Each structure stands twice: as C-alpha cells, then as structure tokens.
C-alpha cells in the first residue's frame, strides 16, 4: 500500500540525518496521497540506523486512525494532520529540533527576512507561534500545536506556499513543501537562514533589509516570471 | 569479572568520541553493578584509540579501592562513587568537557529549561554547583566535587532521575542514567541544549519559557502516562 | 571549445562544495579567456553531484549571449560580466552564500581588516555595497548588482587586485582572482575572516587593528618584495 | 641528517590539519635538537597534501642560516628561533591561525583562565602581546614578533613551561611544548579554551573563576604531586 510514497517518506527522513538536522530520533517527515486521503509518516522513536521503508505508518487524514503499519506513528502525527487539512496545497511536512531554528523558536521571535537567501525561499519573516494556553497544552496537545500554527497563518493572511515554514514557540521548526523532498529542502534552508541571522544580528543589532530585494528574489525563483534554474 | 559491564562501559566511552563530546582523554564513563557493589570505570589518561574493554578498572563502591585492573582508574573516580552512593537509582555516569556545556559551567549559571528539547529529558534547569571552598579543593578534591553536586540536589529537593545532569562550576558537565548508554545519551542532550540556549539568549536575552510545556513534554516521555516511542 | 577552461571552472565549482561554502546550488564560479573574449560559467540550478565539465556554459563577454552550451547559464552571469569588464586584471569569479560572509553582508557592514589573516589577502576592509535603488532592482537586476559593486570600487579608488572580494548588501559575497582557482581560494579566506571577525567583535566590541601590520603582511605576500612561500 | 626529528616535525604538521587547526598553508611546526643546536621546520607555503618529511628544512639555531634543505623555511622561522633561544626548556613550537584563538588575538585580549580545562594545561591567562612599534614591524619583523612575545614573559615573570602559549596581537597563537607533539597538543587546547571562553562570556559577561581550582588542576597534572594519568 502506497509503496512509492513510503519510499519517498523514508528517504526524506534519512536525508534529515544526512543534512545534520537530526540527533537521535528528534525529527520526522510525512507525505500525503491527496486522492486517497492518506498520510505516510515515520514511526515514533525508531532509530534512523535500523529504520526501513516498510516501517512507515499509514494514517487516515480525516480520522487520524492508523490504516497500515505495526508501529505507532510519530507522536507529532496530529500536528501534521492539522497542517495537511488547513493547507491543501502541501504534500510533505518536516519537523526537526535543528540547532539554530530551534534556538530562534526558544527565543520566541519571528525569524526576519534579512537576506536574499531567505527571500529565495520564504517571502516574509518565518513566523513564531503564540504561547499555547493551558487548555491547549493539557488538551489534545499535538493537535493544538497544529492549531496555533494555522491560527497565525489565517489571522495574518500568510500564504503557506510562500512561507513554507514556522517556528513553534519554545519548541522548534516545522516546514513543508509540495512533496516530502521539498519539505526537507525547506528545513535545510530554515536552519541555514536561522544560523546566518544569529550571526548577522550579533554583528549588527540594528541591521536593515532592503524590501525591494525581498520581492525581486522571491519572484525570481517563484511565480510565473521565475527565471532561476533550468526550464522544466 | 563483570565482562558484560566492562564491554558496556568501554562502548559508552567510545560513543563519547563518536558524538564529538571528547578531545584527547577529556572524558570518562562508568557503570555500576548494584548487587555486587562494584563500579567499572575508564582508566586515567588512556587514549581512546588504543583503549580496550579489558583495560576498564573495577572499583569497590564502598571503599573506592581497585578490585581488578592493572591501570589507575580515572582521577574522577571519587566523584562517580559519591554520586552512585547518593543517587541509588542511577546505573551509569558520564563526565566530559564538551564545548557548550563546559562554557555554561564556566559561566557559572544554571542552564535554564527554555525549550521542549530540554524538557523532553530534564524536568528543570540543569543546576550549576556552588563555588568550592578552600577546605574542599585542598582536601579530597574529587570526592568533594561529588559532594557539592549532591548538596545542591538535596538542598533544593532536585530529583536526580528527573534532572539527570549537573554543571560543576568552572569545570564541566556530569550526566547520568539508568545505565552507561543512557548517561551518554543525556550527555549528548546537555551539550545540544547548552548550544541552543547560547544561541537563543544571544538572539533574545529576555526570552521566556512557557511552564506548561515543561510539564507536558517531560510527562510525555516519562512517567506512567508516557506516550512517546513504541510500547515496551 | 575552451575545454581546458571548462575543466578548470568545473573543478573550481566542485571545490566550493569541498570547502563547505555551498549548500544545494547556492554558488557559482566562472573563468574568462581574455583573448577570445569568452566567459565559461556554471549552469543555473544544476546539482553539483550530477554536474559535468561538459555542462559549463560559454558566454560572450561583450554581448552576454550564450555561445555554447545546452543549459541556461547561472542567473548571476550578468554580474560576472560586469566585473570582468570593469576589472581587466581578473580571470575568475566566485559567488557563494557562505555562512559567515553572507551574515556580514546581511549585517550591511564592511568587513574590517582586524588581523594578519585578512591582511595576507585583502589590503583593506572588504567593502559592503550600498542599498540598491528601485530602478536597479526592478531593472536589469543582476547587471545592476555588478554595477553597485564596481561603483564602490571606483568611487573609493579601491584596487580590485588588492581587495579581491566584496559583500553585496543583504545578499552575499563575491570574490575573484587571476583564475578560477584563486577566486575560490579568496572565497575560502573571506568566509574564514568573516567567522573570526564575528567572534573577535563578540569578545571585544572595541578592538583595534595595528595599521602597521596591514602594510607589512600584505606586502609580505604581494608585490615586488614578497617573501612568503617558495620562489616561482 | 636529523631524520627522526624531521619525521616528528612532519607528523606534527600533518596533525595540525587533522585537528582542524589549519586552512591551506596557514600553520607551521618546528622541533629542535638542543645538543646540535639545529632546528627543523616546515618549508614556507608548501601544501600539506604533497608535503614529505624530506622537505623539512634544517636551520642553525644561532645564525638562522639554512643548514640543509632545498626549500625556503617557513617565513616565521625567526620567530621560532627567538623563542628557542629565550625558552631553553622547550623542544617544539607551533604557529597556526586557528579560528577561535586567532579571534582572541584579533580582539587583543589575554585569554583568561576561567575553567579547569584551561587550568589543566595553562597556569594563568594566555597572554596577548603588546602592539608592535613601527621600528619592530618595519625592521626584522618576524624576529621582532618573537621579541614581543619574550618581552611579555620576562616583564611579568611568566614561566613558559607553565604557560605554554601566547596570542600575538592582531595575528594569532603560538604554542610550544617539550617536543613538537606536545606543542600541537597545546595548540589544540588553546583553540578549544578560546572557543569555550567566547561562549562563556557571551552567556555571562561577568563570570568569575575560582582561583583555588586553578592551583588544584594545574598541580594535579603538573609538578611533583601530579596524579592524573598512568605512572610513567
């Protein structure tokens, strides 16, 4: 069942390790089959070294029930499902505790768009979510983690395709993309821009970004007039 | 004698190097056989490259005397013994001079719990010990190093199982766990949360932690209602 | 056509990855044949893993037209061409988004000459360009990026042979040299001095440089009385 | 001639690369035969990849003349010779531009003894030299670099055996030891304590060191009552 997607999700999980974004089991990737309404996700707490594509767990998008797989799905599965339901354009989601993006999440600050590296992938600041309430934390916590993300995007009319990532306050980054591979790509970008912003603000706390560059670089890689890379 | 434990302690010492926590011989791991009252520990100042499991030294928990082994035990052995005597739940101890955890120890500050990565493993701040007195330093120094650790835990009713690590002021981190492998795991976590906290406070010196997340994440991985990972 | 130069440009691009200056496709190297008036440059958005020397694109220095190659040249090609036209002494150009040099570019500050490592290669501060105007960004952006670089060098009489690199504000570093290999070498130096300057200013925001050392170290490696290295 | 020492000096130079202290050719190691009054040192500007033990250059301690070798000795040779003449106890010297130690040298500050890692190897702060004068820089520069180092040690009665390293202001670190291997060892320690001090002061600019620990840790590894490591 969904062997091809399982293979992609498995490979994307391994790529997290290869890119240095994950220690131990601190990360997970999922992918979705929109037609079937099924999500494939990494099992919870399984070592990357011994993990196989067969162990990926299939979960129903609507109900959250496990449809196939002998292991428990990632404990963050409810967060992934909320994001897939709210953002119909996305096909893959990544969660990590990567060093610099997590540090910004712990700092509780939006990660500002201060360079073309950021603008090539993220149109605006990468938002940091609000503090979760007692009702949210003590209730269905992982589902509510998805809700605080979606709340911020809806409230401020942030387009999740143009801003494919978020910092969950005091927790860490989530990123997404049109498939699991692109979600991993965006997780790497978030970590790198978080590291560069840490250094840049240390060097110059009063730095400014040229807003013209944001529009230029984002549109150079995205939208109808993109001209970066090879024609596809 | 204790061949299986020697093998585990040896492997845990090698893992410190693999995880990048140790330069030269600046680290040691021990494990305990509670029934026999014997501790197995790395020899002092021996290169990791040439070290073998056979070289691990067996020491009596009560007396500190070497029971087996041709080499001197780690000079930090008396610290390990004090911790094993004071914290009967623990089965393995690690000491390193890992970069970021040691920097926090040099800074002389408790490492605050500012994120879920920390809360997944350590219930509270990782405490930093008091300054040692002349009597302590000039007396039985390594034993007194253990005492300043234990003093802090007893005085503030810190549960060593819920806070499996400490920073010795101007020195470096100790961590522990139910066995040597878990103690190494916690040493890796300490180094990573120390690094992330360094970055987070640089980005936002006035950052705040949501206390609700501390309880949630700690109980998600620990205690009777834990639901992270696979059922065991 | 230009097989030897293609090989050199290809190798220089691969060296960027080997030196840790490039993530994904975020970098490009070019080289020039001054006699023929032709520039060889990396294709746009092609993975380094699958890239071959044959894929290097040949572009006319005067017109910017592709003379040979089936792929689109790097989107930064017009920037390279402006630099080759303005700086007739140079034979190779590198652009990266390397972490620390890019952070300084995001900080919008000249990278000061504060040590002999810097002075061994760059006579003065590595300049950071002005903010680009709406006309520049919305016009022929990559060409104008070259122009803001050249403007700064001309306006302040900076010798591009003695200061073989620049920070484009909110964007990242460009470096150059007498051939592609030397341009890569200078890119590595820029990244390293950017990292050391970040640390040095964190340790001592009021640090000062001895101007005598600038002259001494620069002339020790450059000019008629150079005495570093072996006689050539 | 001096084949064994050449082999040791060669190996020590390669170890600098292995320990990540050197980029390109930015480092050199020498060793001395005190009986013969001859110093063996790395040739200037030679790649580490292609370097062989045969290429090490033999220089006369008293005159600085090359006694054997077809290549020019390191341009820093006169600095090494001044140190060998002033500090008769030492047998090997290292110079690098390693990242964090060089950053402290650029910051122009003594590297304070703020932890037991430092105290295990360096009894006091690692001193940073004075600014060099015009006469020194424009005269016999590399020899005068040695003189500013020695001046500081003599003026403040610093024992070079107990403080086996120095930061040359706006330049970088020199370290030494009883042989080339120990000099490399101390170079690794300086880089690591420089990195930890950078982080520690960022976390707590007002940190304090317990002076009792300095004495304890230094004497634990050095002097007649040392008890770290195995009996020799």
Image (cartoon, coloured by chain):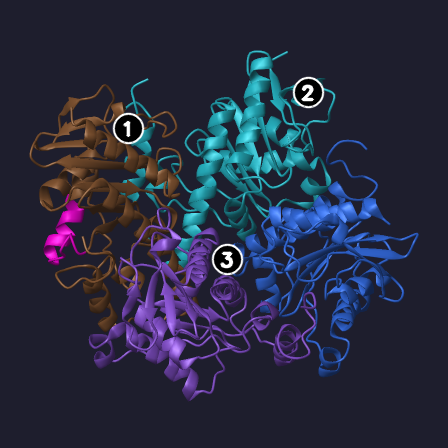
Chain colours: A cyan, B blue, C brown, D purple
Camera-side residue: D95 or C170?
D95
Instruction: Report the residue at 17% width, 56% height from top.
Output: C162
Q: Is residue A104 left or right of residue A53?
A: left
Quadrant position of residue A51: top right
Is C154 included in the stretch rendered in magenta? yes
Q: Is residue D65 above or below residue C135?
A: below
In the image, residue A62 lies at what x, y percent?
Answer: 65, 19
The residue to which callout 1 is attached is C44
Chain letter for mark 2:
A
Q: Are marks 2 and 3 in contact (CB under 8 Å)?
A: no
Q: Which residue is mark 3?
A: B204
Which stretch appears magenta? C147-162
Q: Is residue B147 left or right of residue D123?
A: right
The question of residue C176 being in magenta is answered with no
Q: Position of residue A80 (x, y in %)?
A: 60, 29
Please name which of the two marks, 2 or 1, marks the residue nearer to the observer: 1
B106 left or right of A199?
right
- Name the chain letter of the residue that bears numbered label 3: B
Label 1's element?
loop
Contact (CB < 8 A) between labels 1 and 3?
no
Q: Is C213 above or below relative to A148?
A: below
| Within-10-Å neighbours for mark 1: few <14, some 14–19, many 20+ | many
Indicate which disc residue A63 carries: 2
């Amino acid at each position: 069942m969904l062997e091809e997607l399982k293979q992609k999700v498995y490979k994307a999980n391994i790529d997290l390790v290869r890119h240095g974004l994950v220690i131990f089991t601190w990360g997970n990737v999922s992918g979705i089959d929109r037609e079937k309404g099924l999500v494939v996700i990494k099992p919870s707490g399984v070592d990357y070294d011994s993990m196989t594509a067969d162990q990926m767990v299939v979960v129903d998008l609507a109900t959250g029930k496990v449809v196939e797989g002998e292991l428990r799905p990632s404990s963050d599965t409810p967060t992934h499902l909320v994001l897939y339901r709210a953002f119909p354009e996305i096909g893959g989601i990544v969660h990590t505790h990567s060093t610099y993006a997590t540090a910004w999440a712990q700092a509780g600050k939006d990660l500002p768009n201060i360079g073309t590296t950021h603008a090539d992938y993220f149109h605006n600041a990468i938002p940091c979510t609000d503090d979760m309430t007692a009702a949210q934390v003590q209730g269905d916590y992982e589902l509510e983690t998805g809700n605080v993300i979606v709340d911020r995007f809806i409230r401020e009319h942030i387009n999740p395709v143009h801003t494919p990532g978020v910092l969950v306050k005091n927790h860490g980054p989530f990123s997404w993309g049109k498939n699991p591979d692109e979600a991993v790509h965006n997780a790497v970008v978030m970590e790198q821009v978080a590291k560069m912003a840490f250094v840049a603000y240390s060097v110059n706390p009063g730095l400014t970004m040229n807003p013209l560059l944001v529009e230029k670089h984002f549109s150079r890689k995205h939208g109808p007039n993109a001209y970066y890379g090879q024609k596809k």
